[in-house]
Amino acid sequence: MKNLWLFLVRYNSVFWFILFFVFSLVLVINNNQYQRSSFVNSSNIVVGSFYTKVNSWKEYMHLTEVNKDLLDENALLRYQLQQVTGNDTSKLTALSDSIENPSNYDFIVASVVNNSVHLKKNYITVNKGSLDGIEKDMGVITSNGVVGTVMHVSNHFSTVKSLLHPDTKISVSIDSTASAFGSLVWGENTEPRFAMVRDIPNHVKLYVGQPIYTSGYSTKFPKGIKVGYIVQTDIVTGGSFKDVRILLTTKFEKLTHVYIVKDKLAQEKIELESLNDNNG
């Protein structure tokens, strides 16, 4: 103990220098937009590279589950295709020719290299960045449901604000007919499989097992992506609205691959709606 004390006394100037240097660095990053952005991007590169290596063995361990999810997704796509074309696959050409406008969305496949699910504020890191066309505020989904929104982007990596984050809020419809709308939030919920849909009008009839979908009101998510199922309906908040508890379809604990949604018409929509704000 005496030797440790003598060591600290002898080199105290060095320790004070390091302390003040780190403190000043934090102040510069927090109070300057350019330095903060540069720090975040650099951190994404370093941390992302580390998580990529760590995640490689995790992907290997979950290959069986990933293959099962892909088989389930292919089975669903085949079923949906058959509903449209029947057994006559030649109808597929006629179907594609009848579509006047191409899809408004591109879907960029990315691998999850880091993921938290049990924190108060959860984030995900994926291995695609600005060089792959990823931009801030893009929506992130899986074949099972919604994952979150892109938060920060570097050249090769992006961090995603998970749906399991108290600041995440998504517009949803109560069923595929969009008969009623609400806001999906995770709030203070500590369970990664459940969330709340708030501000549903009291007159709307709900039942356990009823599916919840994205409303398509934002440029982040296409309309009609299944988000979850109602598991509790008797949550009354007073006034003209009520809340419901839902079971999320996304399995956050087992995320390995995601789709980043790129709305081709997003910028046009945002610029048009900004005119409303500018004109008061």
Image: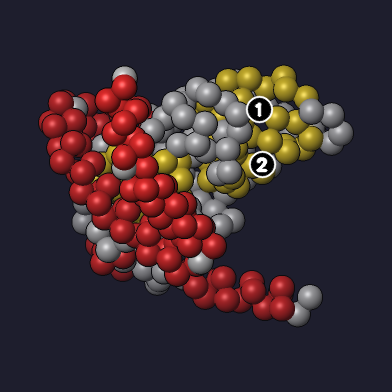
Q: Measuring from the top left, give residue 169's x and y in whole percent.
A: 59, 45
Which residue is found at the position 54% from the left and 54% from the top?
A: 216
Q: Measuring from the top left, give residue 167's x and y in whole percent.
A: 58, 43
Circle 1 packing at 10 Å, graded few (<14), some (14-19), many (20+), is many
Q: Quadrant of the N terminus?
A: top left
Circle 1 sits in a helix, a strand or a loop, which is it? strand
Which is nearer the eye, 32 or 61? 32
Residue position marked by numbered label 1 in the rendering: 244
Q: Quadrant of the C terminus?
A: bottom right
Label count reads 2
Q: CA distance from mark 1 to mark 2?
A: 10 Å
- Residue kind at label 2, given as amino acid type: Gly
Which residue is found at the position 47% from the left and 57% from the top?
A: 24
Task: Check contact, mark 1 vs mark 2: CB within 8 A.
Answer: yes
Residue 172 visible (yes or no): no
Which residue is found at the position 66% from the left and 27% from the top?
A: 244
Residue position marked by numbered label 2 in the rendering: 182
Q: Is residue 60 above or below residue 231?
A: below
Q: Is residue 7 left or right of residue 36?
A: left
Q: Measuring from the top left, give residue 120's x and y in whole percent.
A: 52, 31
Q: Which quadrant of the figure has residue 124?
A: top left
